[in-house]
Amino acid sequence: MHSRGRRDKPRYVCPPPRGCGKVSIDRPALDDWAADAELITALDGHSEALDELNRSYFDTAELTYFEWTCTRDALLLATEQITSDAPELLPSGFPPGR
């Protein structure tokens, strides 16, 4: 896909001769979708890290309370920063770290 189009209608197109020349998509919409997908992937990673952290503290006692709280707080802060940048990605009342 290549970026083409006029200033008022930027698009990604599949140009000939190697491409089909028939497929195109609105460039700003695709760029927004890709950015949202990255944020959601980051949130999923934070959720998995928090689950693993909780297992390490509550299930296996591999961490001290101090280690657990410091790491948990850092994860929750990073998650809060992501969600404050894009609150429309999450339903209202969505808990941080999930």
Image: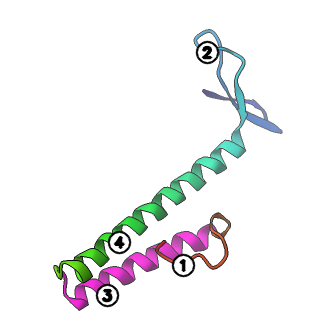
User: Which span of residues is magenta-colored?
Assistant: 63-86
28 inside magenta stretch: no
Q: Residue at x 41, y 67 (%)?
A: 46
For mark 1, what is the residue?
Answer: 95
The residue pinned by badge 4 equals 51
Q: Could you say whether the residue bearing mark 4 is in a helix, strand or loop?
A: helix
Crowd rating for badge 3 (residues with CA inside 10 Å; few <14, some 14–19, many 20+) = some
Residue 69, numbered label = 3
Q: Amino acid at mark 3?
A: Thr
Q: Residue at x 70, y 39 (%)?
A: 27
The answer to the question of whether label 4 and label 1 lie on touching residues, with beta carbons closer than 8 A, is: no
Residue at 45% x, 74% y is: 78
Does residue 19 appear in the picture of this structure?
yes
Residue 51 lies left or right of residue 22; in this view the side is left
> Looking at numbered disc 1 in the image, what kind of residue is underneath it?
Pro
* Image coords of residue 72 (percent x, y): 35, 81
> Mark 4 or mark 2: which is in front?
4
Mark 2 vs mark 1: which is more N-terminal?
2
Label 1, label 3: how many angstroms apart (C-alpha)?
A: 17 Å
Specify the label residue 19 is tagged with: 2
Say which label, 3 or 2, has the lower sequence index.
2
The answer to which image quadrant residue 49 occupies is: bottom left
Which of 71/57 is in front?
Answer: 57
Mark 1 crowd level (few <14, some 14–19, many ≥20, 10 Å Cα): few
